[in-house]
Image (cartoon, rainbow, N blue to C red):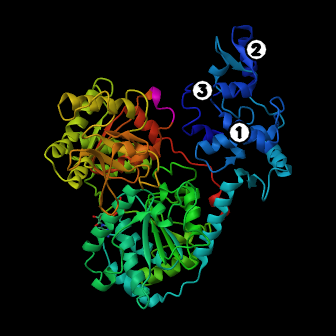
Amino acid sequence: MSDLNQQPGLFDDVDDAPIYESSLLNEQAADSVTQTPKVVPLLSYLTEQHRVRVVDVKLAELLSGNNTEHDHDELFYIILMLCLSQQSQHSCLTLTEVDWTNPFNLRQSDFTKLEGTVPDTLTPFSDDFTTEAAINYLHAHHSVGDHKPLQLFNQRLYFSRLAGYEQTLAQRLLAMSERQLNIDDAVLTELLTRYFPDNPTLDIDWQKVACAIAATKGFSVITGGPGTGKTTTVTKLLAILQSLYQAAPLSIKLVAPTGKAAARLTESILGAKNKLTEIPADINALIPQSAQTIHRLLGVKPFTNKFRHDKSNPLHVDVLIIDEASMVNLSLMAKLIEALPAHARLILLGDKDQLASVDTGSVMSDLCQGLVLGQTPQYSKARCEQLNKVCFNGAAKLKAQTQSEFKLADCIAFLQHSYRFDAKSGIGQLALAVNTNDRGILNYVEQHSTQGHFSDVILDYDFVSTPIEKLINSAASHYGDYLTLIAQGASVAKVHEAFARYQLLAAVREGDYGVNSLNQRIERVLQQQGLISVNPNQRHYTGMPIMISQNDYQLKLFNGDIGILMPDDSGQLKALFIDEQGNERAFSPARLPAHDKVYVMTIHKSQGSEFSYTAMVLPPLKQASVGINRQLVYTGITRAKQTFELVADKKVLQLAMGKSVSRASGLYERLV
Ligand SMILES: Nc1ncnc2c1ncn2[C@@H]1O[C@H](COP(=O)(O)OP(=O)(O)OP(=O)(O)O)[C@@H](O)[C@H]1O
């Protein structure tokens, strides 16, 4: 069960190798019995060590019908494993990936302790309980099946709620993609030519292909790395759609998963609308100016996990664009799709290579499986012909590769050319090196950055001899800008703008290179420099930057929202936020939902935001075995707009590059 155990969470604190030899284990367990530690039943050991939660034990007992402590059957333990899997944001438990001889990934150290307790066994399952036996067992079990608490799909076990979301999503996406749209090819060709004039520097204009794909399908995905023109493309797409439906203009909504991402989308769509002068004014006026959060669009019903808009009360929308779709979890995506009217078009925008959502599922990367940079996606022959006709006057630029079994293959557009980062830019090259685990490109970036050719990338590998103080002082000096503005009485917008210019990101929370310690140390330096004044008896102070860590639907403050504490006109200390429409919002600190200091933020929390100067610190090698991976580092790098600084042991960077994580999900399989 490599995938399950690679996920951050349960086994974070365990850094020795797992044991796979059960005979060896038996010996060690036996040895340890002769020493002081007490041998306890496996389940007691797992709960005592906080490897499984008591609440999950209770749930597993309830669902398996095992009420007595000493009467736990196979289903009980499989449900525990499913709980663990879900805590690592997998949608299901992939039974083929379970190591039945060591399903809880016990380690050598679990058995070789000199004191405390050791488990009595590696596995609760008998030797003949293989994956095949497990699947047969589950198939026959009365708790598994339609309208039962657990469901099997292929070789995957689900809690029925999540299986239901996956099923809904797959069915709706398929139905949307198969809907017949009456588009006049000749008119579409003319519009595509108008918005995408021939560009001799590009063999294939993927933006044009993306527009053609999204214009001709009820459902589409437009994915691409930073600066590949997702916003530009979607703005042109909306102009094309409004031109196609000019007689009855479409109701278009733009949404993003967080307020920050919605604010960014608003800003970039406005920028694109102003820049694209080829869009006629009357059509331009029909393209929305601003984006909102998904929660705002759906209308949160306070104190429930339900929304005002759902299947029985669908949204009034003809076209829905979801930006930063990789951050949207399975349940929210399913609820959003259920709330769409049958005729609506859905377009997902985002970067498939970024971190998946903080919650369960990985919809975007599931849908984008198999895309390879530099290659034509696996479109069907008929689709290639159609796209060649409308985009390239029939020239056979797109050639059908091997026919994909994936039913949505014809709906996926992959933007492959970065317009923001040209060959002179290190950020784009570094992101590429990490994303493709290409040490050659990494060497190239290193050489060019030390020689000063890539002024946008600073690589500080001198992890041991250069103390972390250098980074802390550098962060403090950047943050001095917004603090000076507060002291000068600048506007809230100006202060927020200055704060957002620089951000230090850390991969972990704990340890010297983690968010908690770095936050304290930067605060101390700012205090020493007289830029802030911290009173040990008061949590809040002028200049403190905070990030909300819990949604508050009453106050409409959401996880990830950033506020800065400043005195208002009457001198009262307030937390000031700017919402996605650019409006100021002030709250007294006592009313705020859970929040943290944010001189440093985790890379996870930075997703959906951008900073002119982004600095990122990775933990030392001994802390980097869990949770540091390619998607994490790539997400951190691509937050940078102008300058990216990395402080890390080069070995940790390389380790991350070599480790790509994926989440267990059956969405793709439901669509083949
Ligand atoms: N076809 C094009 N020709 C020239 N410049 C382009 C083209 N497409 C996009 N750009 C420019 O590249 C930059 C990035 O484009 P855009 O913001 O649309 O990309 P994005 O993929 O949405 O970026 P992000 O990484 O912010 O999500 C913008 O300055 C835009 O004007």
Q: Name the residue under label 3.
A: 17
Q: Is mark 1 on a helix, strand or loop?
A: helix
* Residue positioned most to the top: 35
Start-end of magenta stretch: 622-626
Mark 3 or 1, which is nearer the eye?
1
Label 3 near ligand 1 (CB < 8 Å): no
Q: Distance between the residues labelled 2 and 1?
A: 26 Å
Indicate whether residue 266 is drawn in magenta: no
Q: Which of marks 3 and 1 is nearer the N terminus?
A: 3
Toward the viewer: 364 or 672? 364
- 8 vs 284, left or right, is right
Please, is residue 489 above or below residue 228 in the view? above
On residue 167, which mark appears? none
Q: Residues within 10 Å of mark 2 (few under 14, many from 20)?
A: some
Residue hosting label 2: 30
Cβ–Cβ under 8 Å for marks 2 and 3 = no
Q: Name the residue under label 1.
A: 80
Spot occupied by residue 514 in the image (x, y as percentages of width and height): 39, 32
Q: What residue type is labelled 3?
A: Ala
User: Which of the two labelled residues, at mark 2 and mark 1, occupies the earlier sequence position?
Assistant: 2
Determine the quadrant in which ligand 1 lies. bottom left
Q: In the image, is residue 658 above or below residue 295?
A: above
Q: Nearer the viewer, mark 2 or mark 3?
A: 2
**Foreground tag (2 vs 1):** 1
Give me the C-alpha separation between circle 3 and circle 1: 22 Å
Residue 572 vs residue 648, the one in the foreground? 572
> Which quarter of the rendered picture does the N terminus lie within?
top right
